[in-house]
Amino acid sequence: MIVKNEEELLQRCLSSIKNVADEIIIVDTGSTDNTITIANSFGAKIYHRPWNDSFSDARNYSLNYASGDWILQIDADEELEQADIPKLQSAVNNPRYNGIVVAIHSDIKDNIHKFYNTRIFRRGKGFYKDIIHEQIIMEGERLPTEIRLYHRGYNLDEKKMQIKWQRTTRLLKKQIEQNEFDSFAWFNLIRNYRTQELFQDGINAGEEALKKITLNSCLNEAGRTGNTQHYAMITYETANCYLHKGDFVKARELCYTTLSKLEASGITPENIDITFTLACTYLKEGSYKKAIDYFKRFLSLREWHLKHMNTNSLMIDTLGYDYAANNGMGYCFGYLGQWEISINYLQKAILCNPKSLTAYRNLASYYSSIESYNKATHILLKAVSEGIADDGVLLRLGELYIHQKAYEMATPYLEEYLKKHPKDKSTLLKLAWLYEKSGHLEAALIGYRSARAAQESYGGQFHREGDNPL
């Protein structure tokens, strides 16, 4: 591990690996909090190295002190799934492989992003390159696994995330200043902008990068660090920035141009990340049949990559997006009126990722469309139990219970919603009506008066619904 001021998360991280690691080696790059004290409490061997703006230097320095046959690289904002320790112990006993690929589940806003990375490798068989977003360079085959690491570092409070993004941007620009043809740094800079929703900055960086990083330069010109996968990732990230800006034509053109160039150069199979982006572009445009076709192509490519992960070292962003593809197809089939197929895909999406709130919303919406209100309620209650429900889910649950005439059940959800949205007069009126139906007349009167006062303050006419306000 390399650390600096990690007291908030370090204990959870070290607790997760203490029963699997024979030694814990930590390189500290200047902590001023309780990081060292926490590390010492786990018997870690601690070494100090001044920070020089290079994550690879610090990581490679830490490798010098390892004495075991295998190295597990983990960050302080990550945790190893305890149930997967037997899988890890079995994996390191396989003589065929020099590396082990794990599944990293990264918390992001309202969701979990899953991707695969080589985090376990034989000592002496790997080293790191690049000053930020450092990559492991290793020889030999890698064993693909579903050993889980949980990453918390992209779900911090806004202030901490801003500090993190600013540092990342600075280091990436520094890396590009050192080598303007560093395709990996360009790709990460565009991604950094996209993650912060600075889409125009991402487009500007992407267009500038594509003037310098061409497919031909990646294929033919010696002395440049670019490669064809980085070229594809630059176009993928830039196309996604266009997609988020609503410029579907530009997004599609960039995707098709890149796919054509890759195919003409004999690079197969079709790029999975760009294929996924095309599917999303068609979905956003409302071209649902084309979107379905590309989501299916994406899932087929995903199966190919999973089967060839042991020898395929390509960096793939969308390998964990099977849930998103199923959700996308469910959404499309729903708009095409094919409810049964739609529901089947949305159920698959939730099985693939129980933290995907969008899939719960879509499934509940389509159940409601066929008047299966009980099933719609059940699916939103599952979202609540997963801890991912937002205010919109609470409001919808209240409305669904009203549809089913379960007035007492509806009340607490609308009450909870109104705590955060006290000026929502429509919901206030519904709640007052619920109080009346449930016999809580005093509370109903207060609600009606509040709704009338709010309505009159806007010059509108107040009237009380005689029956179901929906």
Image (tube, helix red, strand yellow):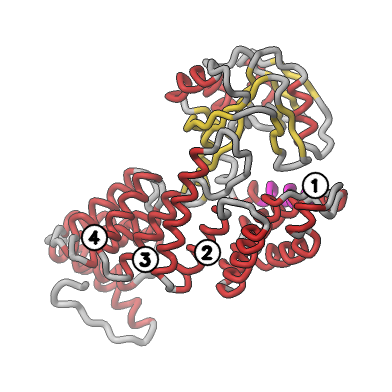
Q: Counting other residues with Cα less than 10 Å from the Cα at mark 2, is it few (<14), some (14-19), or many (20 or more)?
A: many
- SS of the residue at dot 2? helix
User: Residue 439 lies in magenta, yes or no?
Assistant: no
Q: Is residue 123 above or below residue 420?
A: above
Q: Counting other residues with Cα less than 10 Å from the Cα at mark 4, is it few (<14), some (14-19), or many (20 or more)?
A: some
Question: Where does label 2 land, which residue?
Answer: 278
The answer to which of marks 4 and 1 sits earlier in the sequence is 1
Rendered image: mark on residue 332: 3
Q: Is 131 positioned to the left or the right of 240 in the image?
A: right
Magenta residues, as a range?
Answer: 162-173
Of badges 4 and 1, the one in the foreground is 1
The answer to which of marks 3 and 2 sits earlier in the sequence is 2
Q: Counting other residues with Cα less than 10 Å from the Cα at mark 3, is it few (<14), some (14-19), or many (20 or more)?
A: many
Q: Amino acid at mark 3?
A: Cys
Of badges 3 and 2, the one in the foreground is 2
Q: 123 or 39, which lies in front?
A: 123
Q: Amino acid at mark 1?
A: Thr
Rendered image: mark on residue 340: 4
Rendered image: mark on residue 225: 1
